[in-house]
Amino acid sequence: MNLQKNGMNGQERKEWEALCRQYNVDSLYEAIQGCREELEFLIHCAERLEPHTEEEEETPFNTYRPQRFSAPETAV
């Protein structure tokens, strides 16, 4: 994949490569999914520190749903 062709500059490419190394994955999509799961876990931990009030509306950001990391299916 030509990253310059897709509008990614040198700094973005370095950040992309660092994310892929951090999550030990080969694609940006997989790295983003790893970040999302980590963020959901941190939100869950933070919610345990602050009591949930009945007035709060449940949103994707305050409702923890554990997800198992899975790679996207590839078309053949």
Image: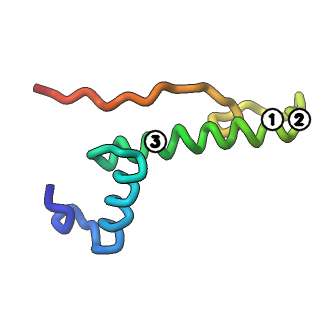
Q: Which of the 4 quarters of the picture holds residue 38?
A: top right
Amino acid type assigned to the residue bearing label 3 in the image:
Gly
Quadrant of the drawing holding the N terminus? bottom left
Amino acid type assigned to the residue bearing label 1 in the image:
Arg
Quadrant of the drawing holding the C terminus? top left
Q: Gap between marks 3 and 2, in whole Å?
A: 27 Å
| Residue furthest to the left | 76
Badge count: 3
Instruction: Indicate the secondary structure of the residue bearing disc 1.
Output: helix
Q: Gap between marks 2 and 1, in whole Å?
A: 7 Å
Q: Gap between marks 3 and 1, in whole Å?
A: 22 Å
Query: Please, is residue 45 above or below residue 1 in the view?
Result: above
Report the residue at 88% width, 28% height from top.
54
Instruction: Indicate the secondary structure of the residue bearing disc 3.
Output: helix
Query: Please, is residue 47 above or below residue 65 in the view?
Result: below
Observer-side mark, 3 or 2, equals: 3
Report the residue at 28% width, 74% height from top.
10
Q: Is residue 35 left or right of residue 73?
A: right
Numbered label attached to residue 48 = 1
Observer-side mark, 2 or 1, equals: 1
Amino acid type assigned to the residue bearing label 2 in the image:
Pro
Q: Are marks 3 and 2 in contact (CB under 8 Å)?
A: no
Q: Which of the 4 quarters of the picture holds residue 33?
A: top left
Pick the front one: 66 or 18: 18
Query: Please, is residue 10 above or below residue 40 in the view?
Result: below
Residue bearing the label numbered 3: 34
Report the residue at 36% width, 41% height from top.
30
Q: Residues within 10 Å of mark 2 (few under 14, many from 20)?
A: few
Instruction: Indicate the secondary structure of the residue bearing disc 2.
Output: loop
Query: Please, is residue 32 above or below residue 45 in the view?
Result: below
N-terminal-most mark, 3 or 2: 3
Q: Is residue 61 left or right of residue 48?
A: left
